[in-house]
Image (cartoon, helix red, strand yellow):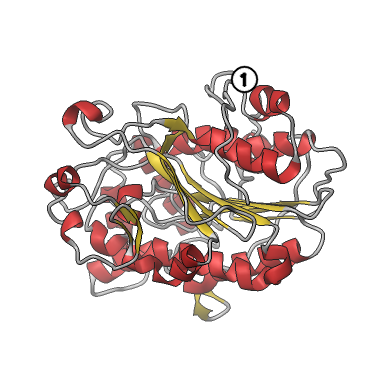
Amino acid sequence: MGKADMNRRAFLGRGLAMGCSLAASPLLTPVSFAATSGENRLVVIILRGGLDGLDLLQPADPGLQLLRPTLAARKPSGMEVSGGAMLHKSCAPLWPLWRSGELAFVQGVSTPYRNKRSHFDGQDYLEAGTTSLSGTGPRDGWLNRMLQNMPGSEMSTAYAVGADPMLLSRGDASVETWSPDVGFVLSSQGARLLELTMERDPQMSLAMSRALLLAGEGGGGAMAVDDASMMDELEGMMDAQMTTNGKGAAQAHVRVAEFAAQQLRDAARVACFSIGGWDTHANQAKALQRPLTRLSDSLLALKSGVGDKVWSRTTVLAMTEFGRTVAENGTKGTDHGTGGMMVMAGGAIRGQQIHGQLAGFEEADLYQGRDLMPTDDVRRYAAWAIRESFGLDRAALESVVFPGMQLGDAPGLLA
């Protein structure tokens, strides 16, 4: 099997780093860049693990409060965006972006993926941009197909955080790789916690077992160390508990964003990367703080790194493979769901907007009686961001970039 044909169910190399789950790790996928004509920039961030949009932007709805006695009972952040909906307190650094019209949200959206709620399949649907994953041969991604339909575009620089090419950017346009120098440390207690975390997904569990086995055979992957506190270990895994040239790797995501900004400030016009840690099955009130902080850090690093002039021409789309269950579970977390949320940022967007709609929180309003009902296709919003940024025609977007997607009316995403 060639490198381009490998999928995330296979062991992804001895440099593997693991967070809460393999699929949610920020170190399994690369970041890609493309140089195109014009001055507009597009950044796509994949939020791996399934962001709970109802916690990021909590609606003021009594029905939701009944289903989330713990999560919905938190003290209001005071950052009201619309109709009583409150931005999560961990996103306080992004509040100035909202106030200045550089932040927006799309609620109640999803890919065509339904029912099985697997991270791997969900992320493949999101990155492939198709209505089906059937067929043989290498699978390409919608961002790569977009580039092939943009006159004058040329893949110029790409960097991989991990060992396997990011499906989002995979295709006929060639990419190169770059990675922050990252190592990974995991204790035996941590390995057991990973096994328990992944019991609900046999494919992920198998991939994790293979990774630990190979890493333990002398590769440059995980090493066993002593750690007295299993809770500290779990928290460490949520940060991928890495070391970067002797420094805490909690800043690895910032290094990625800063490098992306450097390229976008130069010839690059398109970039993509991922942020992991969104798989909040337990103690979500605490577990969600870290990935939200990483997202905030990354967006602000992009803005400061590209400078005001480039930021004014930049659109950032943060997308996730699926949402979470509407009701919290017995461990004060949420499980894999369906309807989710897209986060938009940048100086080019029409900010202070909440796009899409919530179907409601009564049992009849929910998808399969448990998930937020998807009311729109997340691909449609990505397509409009592409069209408004680069002028791709409707036929190319509906038949090539996102086959099976209906573009519909313009939602007015960009200013």
Whether residue 52 can be seen here: no
Q: Quadrant of residue 266?
A: bottom right
| Relative height, residue 127 to residue 51 (above, below) | above
Q: Residue furthest top?
A: 135
Q: Residue 345: image x %, image y %? A: 55, 57
Q: Residue 71, percent across and down?
A: 20, 56
- Picture coordinates of residue 370, whole percent (x, y): 22, 33
Question: What amino acid type is highlighted by mark number 1?
Answer: Thr
Task: Indicate left or right for 17 with 405 as reference.
Answer: left
- Which residue carries the number 1 mark? 136
Q: Give the camera-side residue of 140 and 191.
A: 140
When asked about the image quadrant of residue 305, the answer is bottom right
| Residue farthest toward the bottom in the current orientation of the protein | 246
Report helix, strand or loop for mark 1: loop
Q: Nearer the viewer, residue 118 or 105?
A: 105
Q: Is residue 233 left or right of residue 176?
A: left
Report the residue at 71% width, 23% height from top: 395
Mark 1, residues whose alpha carbon is within 10 Å: few (<14), some, or many (≥20)? few
On the picture, is 332 further left or further right than 308?
left
- Screen quadrant of the N terminus: top right
Looking at the image, the residue that sits furthest to the right is: 152
Q: Nearer the viewer, residue 327 or 117?
A: 327
Q: Which residue is at 62% across, 20% downward?
A: 136
Residue 221's spot in the image, x, y percent? 51, 61
Quarter of the view holding residue 169 = top right
Residue 303 against residue 7 in the figure, above or below:
below
Q: Nearer the viewer, residue 8 or 39?
A: 39
Q: Is residue 68 something that shows in the picture?
A: yes
Task: Say above or below: 105 vs 184.
Answer: above
- What residue do we see at 55% from left, 47% from top? 12
